[in-house]
Amino acid sequence: MHPSIQQRSEGLAALRVRAGIATSALYAMIGKEQPVQEIRYQVVPKGKAYHITERATGKVLGFRWKWKDAINFAQALEARADGVKVTLSGGAQ
């Protein structure tokens, strides 16, 4: 990855972390529980395959033939959306 793109990506990840910390601190100050983060990606069975769809848009981001592979892919997408670096190993990508 180009160094300037890598730097921007790391900067955005740091901002996401700081935003999460600030949100937690705000809810702690007002004495309320923080709302639960809804899942972004959902595994939907379609025939013999499992589609991984983005709940906000309904867009299919990929599919897997095995349920476990589909769940792992959806969890990896969730982690990436939260700014965590994830690599998928084994199975189809």
Image (spheres, grey):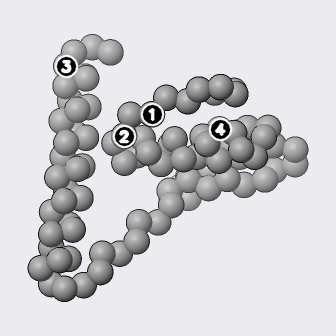
Distance in Å between CA atoms under marks 4 and 3: 29 Å
Q: Circle 1 is placed at which residue position?
A: 86
- Residue, disc 3: 4
- Contact (Cβ within 8 Å) of mark 1 with mark 2: yes
CA distance separating discs 2 and 4? 20 Å
* Neighbourhood count class around disc 4 (C-alpha, 10 Å): few under 14, some 14–19, many 20 upward: some
Looking at the image, which is closer to me, 8 or 10?
10
Label 2 belongs to which residue? 84
Depth check, mark 2 against mark 3: the one in front is 2
Q: What is the C-alpha distance between the residues marked 1 and 2?
A: 6 Å
SS for callout 4: strand
Q: Earlier in the sequence, mark 2 or mark 3?
A: 3
Residue 60, position as x, y percentages in the image: 63, 45
Determine which residue is flagged by label 4: 62
SS for callout 2: loop
* Amino acid type, mark 2: Val
| Other residues around mark 3 within 10 Å, as few (<14) / some (14–19) / many (≥20) | few
User: Would you place residue 70 above or below residue 57 in this image?
Assistant: above
Element assignment for label 3: helix
SS at circle 1: loop
Taking the view exactly as shown, the residue that stands out farthest to the top is 2
Across and down, in percent, residue 15 comes to 18, 46
Contact between marks 1 and 4 (CB within 8 A): the answer is no
Quarter of the C terminus within the rendering: top right
Instruction: Name above or below for residue 74 compared with residue 25.
Output: above
Give the CA distance from mark 1 to mark 4.
16 Å
Q: Earlier in the sequence, mark 1 or mark 3?
A: 3
